Amino acid sequence: MKFIEHSNSVYKSNKKFISPKQKKIRRIILELSIFVVILSILLGILSEVIQSNNTLSSLKKSHRLSGYGEYKIAYAVSGIGDNLVLFESDIGETLLEWNPIVRDAISGVKMLYYDRFGYGGSEKYKDKTSVDTQVDVLNNLIINTGYDGKQILVSEGYGSLIHMEYLDKYKDKVGGVIFINPTIFNHSGINNSEKIKNEVLGMYFKLIATLNIPKLLDKFSCLDNRFIDLYRESAVSRNLDNYLSRMMSRDYYNTVYNEVKIRDKYLSNIDLSKFGTYDLPVIVIESESNRNSEYERMLKSHFSNLEIIYFETIDDFTYNHSDYLKNLIKNMNSRLVEYN
């Protein structure tokens, strides 16, 4: 019982008395809990770094490596022939994007495919990167491998930025081009809601890279990376597990985020008129949703020998239409051989 000051009545207090000793014990328990949580996070990050380094090391050992300054880039070669097919992937993709195409040789061509820095078996590039840097990396790779002959450029999405700039700088080396969903040309058709979606996705990738939680999200099926799902279901590679592990690393998601920023900056400043007109066989594979006369006129202003092929959907094109793409490459090479 306790008297209330300036009152004749009494009340019963429900508040328990906590001694200084009990308060000290509770504070110690709270501090230990916080310490354990922080320690667990740090150990998780350390474990992830070690595992990521081991994965990268394994991938590097299973690929051919080319140098670019102090950095190593992983690449592979398939087929035998005088002409060289160069593949360039979309954002978030690895050389496994071309897995269905390169598993079987295409008559008359050698095929060169690689992981851009930060993907697959290639190291993370710590210096500032741009499309121009990536063009230089590609040209350096070709020089280091020593492969010559006319080149057929095959790219998807973001890869079209690199291949178009490469074509502009080294047009004498190129005999033909195949663009799949060429971001460099069709980006103006992306509506505001799609742009907002891309921005949110980019911030999401940055966030999970910062928190270093991709593998945790994957365990609960919350990672939402369609390339990982695609590779698990359809890719055939002895390095598949290592590729999937690398695609759940901090380096991977930082690279995706950085390339999104590079793409947006490049597209906001590009003047397509600088490219002029090219007289070489060019095939553009597009979605039916992008079919319109203005877009076609723009493409024809750059390529006098142009063929546009529309599909209802071009998602995961190299997996869903691999035989079709192989035939396009084979036919384009036959045209080059006949022409030469």
Image (tube, rainbow, N blue to C red):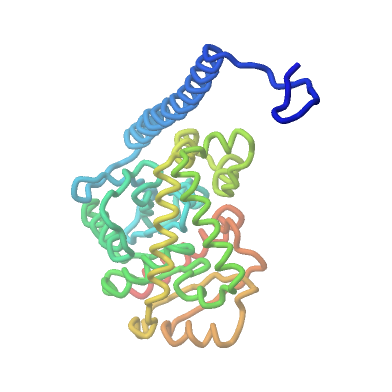
Q: Is residue 108 among the parts visible in the rendering?
A: no
The residue that appears at 60% across and 33% down in the rendered structure is: 219
Toward which corner of the image does residue 23 lie, by quadrant? top right
Q: Could you say where residue 291 lies in the image, as x and y percent from the top left?
A: 61, 79
In the displayed structure, 298 sits above or below 53; it is: below
In the displayed structure, 317 sits above or below 65; it is: below
Q: Could you say where residue 63 lies in the image, as x and y percent from the top left?
A: 34, 39
- Viewport quadrant of the C terminus: bottom left
Residue lying furthest left: 69
Q: Could you say where residue 43 lies in the image, as x and y percent from the top left?
A: 42, 25
Query: Would residue 307 appear left or right of 141 to someone viewing this image?
Result: right
In this rendered view, identify the residue nearer to me: 33 or 264. Answer: 33
Q: Is residue 214 among the parts visible in the rendering?
A: yes
The residue that appears at 60% across and 59% down in the rendered structure is: 315
In the displayed structure, 52 sits above or below 208; it is: above
- Viewport quadrant of the N terminus: top right
In the displayed structure, 331 sits above or below 22; it is: below
Query: Would residue 339 appear left or right of 147 to someone viewing this image?
Result: right
In this rendered view, identify the residue nearer to me: 192 or 242. Answer: 192
In this rendered view, identify the residue nearer to me: 249 or 150. Answer: 249
Q: Could you say where residue 61 lies in the image, as x and y percent from the top left?
A: 32, 33
The residue that appears at 36% across and 75% down in the rendered structure is: 339
